Amino acid sequence: MPKRTDIKKILLIGSGPIVIGQACEFDYSGTQACKALREEGYEIVLVNSNPATIMTDPETAPHTYIEPLSVEFVTKIIAQERPDAILPTLGGQTGLNLAVELFEKGVLKQYGVEMLGANYEVIKKAEDRKQFKQACLSIGLDLPKSSFAYSLEEARKVVQEIGFPCIIRSSFTLGGTGGSIVYGREEFDAKAKRGIESSMISEILIEESIEGWKEFELEVMRDKKDNVVIVCSIENLDPMGVHTGDSITVAPAQTLTDREYQMMRDQSLKLIREIGVETGGSNIQFAVHPKNGRMVVIEMNPRVSRSSALASKATGFPIAKFAAKLAVGYSLDEIQNDITRETPASFEPTIDYCVIKIPRFTFEKFPEAKDVLGVQMKSVGETMAIGRTFKEALQKGLRGLEIHHIGLDNKMDYRIVDDEKMMQRLREPNASRIFYIKYALQKGMSIDDLVEVTRIDKWFLAQMKQIVDFERLLLEEFAKTGKLSEASLRKAKEWGFSDPQLAEIMNVSESDVRELRKQMGIVATFKLVDTCAAEFEAYTPYFYSTYETEDEAIIQNEKTSRLKGGAKRSKIMILGGGPNRIGQGIEFDYCCCHAAFSLKERGYETIMVNSNPETVSTDYDTSDRLYFEPLTFEDVMNILDVEQPDGVIVQFGGQTPLNLARRLHQAGAPIIGTSVDSIDIAENRERFSVLMNELNIAQPANGTASSVQETVEAASKVGYPVVVRPSYVLGGRAMRIVYDEESLMGFVDEVADVSRGHPILIDKFIEDAMEVDVDAICDGSKVFVAGIMEHIENAGIHSGDSACVLPPPTLSEDMIAEIKDSTKRIALALKVIGLLNIQFAIKGEKVFVLEVNPRASRTVPFVSKAIGIPLAKMAARIMAGEKLSGFKLPDVDHLPQFAVKECVLPFTRFMGVDIILGPEMKSTGEVMGLAPSFGAAYAKSQIAAGQALPLKGSVFISVNENDKRAIPFMAKRLQDFGFKIFATKGTAKVLRSAGVVATVVDKTGEGENNILSLIERSEIQLIINTPSGKKSQSDMRQIRAAAIMHNIPCITTVQGASAAVHGIESMLKEGFTVESLQSYYSRTKSA
Amino acid sequence: MKKAVLFLEDGTSFYGTSLNTYGESAGEVVFNTALSGYQEVLTDPSYAGQIVVMTYPLIGNYGVNEEDVESDKIHVKGFVVKEFCRTYSNFRANKSIIEYLDAGKIMGMEGVDTRALTRHLRLSGAMKGLISTEDFDPKSLKAKLAKVPSMDGADWVKEVAPRKAYVWKAAGERKYKVVVMDCGIKRNILREMALLGIESHVVPPSTSSADILSMKPDGIFLSSGPGDPAAVTYVIETVRALIGKLPIFGICLGNQMIGLALGGKTYKLKFGHHGANHPVKDLENNRISITSQNHGFCVDLNSLDQDEVEAIHINLNDRSVEGLRHRKYPLFSVQYHPEASPGPNDAKYLFGKFIEMIEKHRR
């Protein structure tokens, strides 16, 4: 069937901000879909609120809307663009839910928009648990016993039949929100209630617990001709009971015989047909009883998912790309497999390696949250590793996780692990269980006992035991002979032992191990990921390392140079950011992709190194060569040895590659861009202070320390309050504001631990200061200040967690000039080649520099989208030797639009966590609001972040002394708009004298008449509270917690309040307009 | 466990470690790309005379069991993998693959860069090889290998075929009686036919056409089997005599026999098709099946009279012929394995098609 010609314009919905359960895998799938559909000549309209995505690059689609993902906004876009069809299956659950809403509200019908891939009925049938159950039963599939409930009473009745333990899942949510295991009656009511509340349709399913069963997943694709293929099978190491996003998973399935696998395959085929997914990818989860093999269906996603991204990366089969092509009418046999070029897509990939995915958690950021895993997803990222054996893949994955483990290592000596704690860590699934399994094996626990306690399949445990036993042999051999034989070393490398692990065993340095094994000829070899286990020739250079006899990277390199007639292109290697985590996410992957795109365009051969399967950077199309490898010194050096690139870029992947920079440089890697020495000046507080003094740029008083004692001394010298933090970390890890020595003592050990030998930094905290972020590019002699972002929250909240706006609405021209001047002088003094980010604090008329980062920052994609210039692309070219004078630059001082960035926080995932924002970053993602006025841009950003400003109701106002002059005007405006005003005593007095009617309430304390109980009773719709001092901070904490729990916007600065008032006004008076990036940019002047 | 070498006809050596059967074993080296189903592969008689390399590196994960066997013994000459699994896990398993291979005195070899070996076979073609734990001298290995007969022209059917006839009962009520010419059949073919009510009267391949017809079956099934089809002239003769008399369905070797009996030729594929993921299009209904494959030879369509015979199945990877149909007679055959085992069940419908053909012929 050829492609459809009756549709021309297709709307694609992205998945919005990165949240737990929905990460950049949907940027990967959406971008692939855009590319595929444009190749076929369709006109794409794209909407997503997340600026840090490749899909929202103005080059990806001709009509790009960075607008809130709500029915209201998408309806406007549809009215404006009049697409013929909508592809709802590539934007995660958000995209799917939005498409469903658009259908239900009649928007699609009104504008004649057809749903491609999966229509409304299909989505309903797959997503609605009742219909799904019915569908499964009708085709003879087995399911866990279950029943629905819509109220607590009903739920209680149902559970009597099903019994405990049972699982409560709510219909129509993201990533398992509201789902939980219930062991007994005493916890049942609360969990059932929460489930009903978090369901879009107030529905929960109470289900027989199949906790402890083996869990599997199949990725299925279907075309219009009813051809169905299975792309990949995945087996979870963690059994049922742990959300699949939080499980360690392995591809392909390891412990199914062919007969059982085919049964699962047959059921998947039946199910996708019965549900009626017309075209595209779906994933289906199964559970298998470990003792009797009973196989039940768990769920199905009628769309591209997290696991389809994983399956694509694990096999080389681009699911999203093909799903897009199938949606417009092609059949699988009409699509070519890019990798082999000669075989069609209507086949099932086969692989000749083992793939493992390990989730990355950030419990350290939420110390009060219990590190226990369940059916609600908590991980924020993942790493994938490929090896020829499970053992190799597991160890590569663990070191690729970047949590300071060097494999299945001995970070803790098992002899000091407490037995009781160990048993508890084995029994309750948690982030570090895999290491406790190792300790247990080292202590001599049997596999059968471990199966009993962990319910992890024997196969996985036995594989781990092989690693443990072999490590013991290595230790014995070394103890006996004082060395390791070549055979032992080779086997160790084949089983994934890293050089640092071997260094520990041999009591030598990592470089000694490397030297030794190279002498013995034990070097990494690279193999291709080719979808076909070498049955056909592969053309796509996608590699992983292993220890074998043949190196295909070398073969491919020779082939490439032969094809090019021996002409050698300059090679540039880009180091990615590894697994997503809070503080280092999609923004950095975006930068890495841009580097690859622009350098490829300029004729360089680009080499990408990364280990994150969710990303666009690990799409084999992004760079010329892709190495799917952990970002450790050893693994990167192995690639350097084979590729011998002319340049290595370390400044785009966040802190990960930056932390490797010094050692790579010392080992002779040709790092391009800002020198390693300049990076050090920026990070080394003493050297940095000297430089700032030379430049005569003010810095808050500061000191450094290398011990607890020195930290305390430095803090008292600088004077409280102080900001304390470790150096060489990103996302404000272990960073805190402390007001006195007592609180410092309670915290300093953690900082010292996170510092890992690097100095601890102590800065005077400037209270009530405004914070400004600057992104700039420098070519060594010229500086382009691309964006000055005014934070809406005061300094003291991590820049990643605060909203900001560009251009800065309240900064004076003088102030802007001073900031630009300082930025330029710092950039030139540091001899920056490439990107630079500086954070300033402004107190009164004085500007202080807080931090300088000579690398790509989190705000690069935001600024790029706001000003219409791809900064990372430019920076990459400058790093490769081009000059700023060669680029056409926009007039960033006179932009036709305001851009507001707002963050999205994961607190609802971590129950019981104290909800405060501070210098340690906690947000997972961001959205952007774009509009011609600041107010409208701000209002849009709030809607996009899921915190829409109210148009009516009551406002609570409590401001500090400094802000009392500014607030009456805003309160008056709100009152004019019809809001009722509540205020604390002092604030109310000021308001009344300005003619505002304000009801007095207490901030905290007992009784009905305080703000917390008003929030509790949903009587407040907006909070304006500007705090100061320590006491106020802690009151604020409670108010903010209540606000977040009840989803009430809470504004903490007058600037923010003013923004909100503008926003509300623009919503009331003008409503919103939507405009594409391309249209905005057409009005941007050049400099 | 000893050091072992896999020495290939072209002089290339791959090293690894043996299991507990020592000595030497030679055969044609082929690779199989299926991710699961090693027990079925080992017991498939079509692999007689071959050393099988599994491309999936971890073999033995789910052990072996009593049920997933395609014949009464292991037929491969050698089994080469990256890593054999020591501790298996599956609710049906009763022993490890190592115990299984050792018990069958089959030379297993692990620690081999099987991807390099597979690439080598893809580029140079399937060839003879010899596994040895005794001799590592290329010269003497080469001499030994020279004495091993080539797969071309080799009749392996006589090695695996039954000596006596036997009956495989229908699963329920007997609806059809089919004579099965067993050239090395996979049991799952008999199981699948039994499920549809077929009682299989399995006969040795040397059985004459007259004897077969005298059994008065409803149809005839030509089984899969090992070796070069052109070498099994006695079966070809028998098939030629049966064509047109009764409905005939053939699988794999059966398909080749039909091609040859109809006057066509077969040719050797460079490295064959061995796996469970090949797309095959049924030109009669335009359906694509993901199929189980295991063949080194292929029917040359151009050698056949296309007014009489047509290709009805095409491999979408290399466009090779995967199935034939006679334009006049009740006869069709496929080169691949609709009985799966191992592999997808997509093409099981072909057994139903055989029944339809029988029904039609009865009327």
Image (spheres, grey):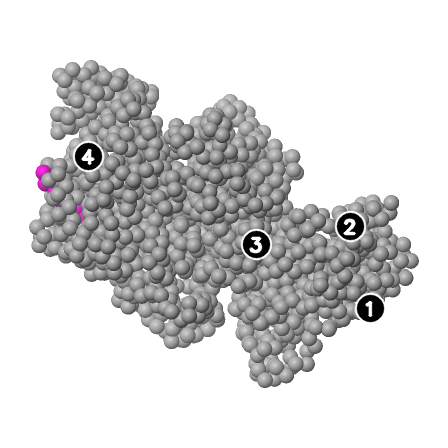
Task: Measure how far apart labels 4 and 2 are at the Cα level.
Answer: 79 Å
Q: What residue type is labelled 3?
A: Pro
Q: What element carries label 2?
A: helix
Q: How far apart are marks 2 and 1 (CA)?
A: 24 Å
* Magenta segment includes B137: no
* Dot 4: element: loop
Q: Earlier in the sequence, mark 2 or mark 1?
A: 1
Residues flagged by tags 1 and 3 on a common chain:
no
Of A377 and A331, nearer the camera is A331
On the image, numbered disc 4 is attached to which residue?
A: A809
In the rendered structure, are the residues bearing label 2 and label 1 in contact, judged by CB atoms less than 8 Å apart?
no
Q: Main secondary structure of the magenta part?
A: strand
Is A1046 left or right of B122, judged from the image as shown?
left
Few, some or many C-alpha atoms within 10 Å of disc 1 (few <14, some 14-19, many ≥20)? Answer: few
Query: Which residue lies at the image location 29% right of the left edge and 24% below the top edge?
Result: A1070
Q: Decide: few, some or many residues near mark 3? Use Cα within 10 Å; few <14, some 14-19, many ≥20.
A: some
Q: Earlier in the sequence, mark 4 or mark 3?
A: 3
Provide the residue designation for mark 1: B234
Q: Is mark 3 on a helix, strand or loop?
A: loop
The alpha-carbon separation of the residues under discs 4 and 3 comes to 55 Å
Q: Mark 2 points at which residue?
A: B354
Q: Nearer the viewer, mark 1 or mark 3?
A: 3
Amino acid marked by disc 2: Phe
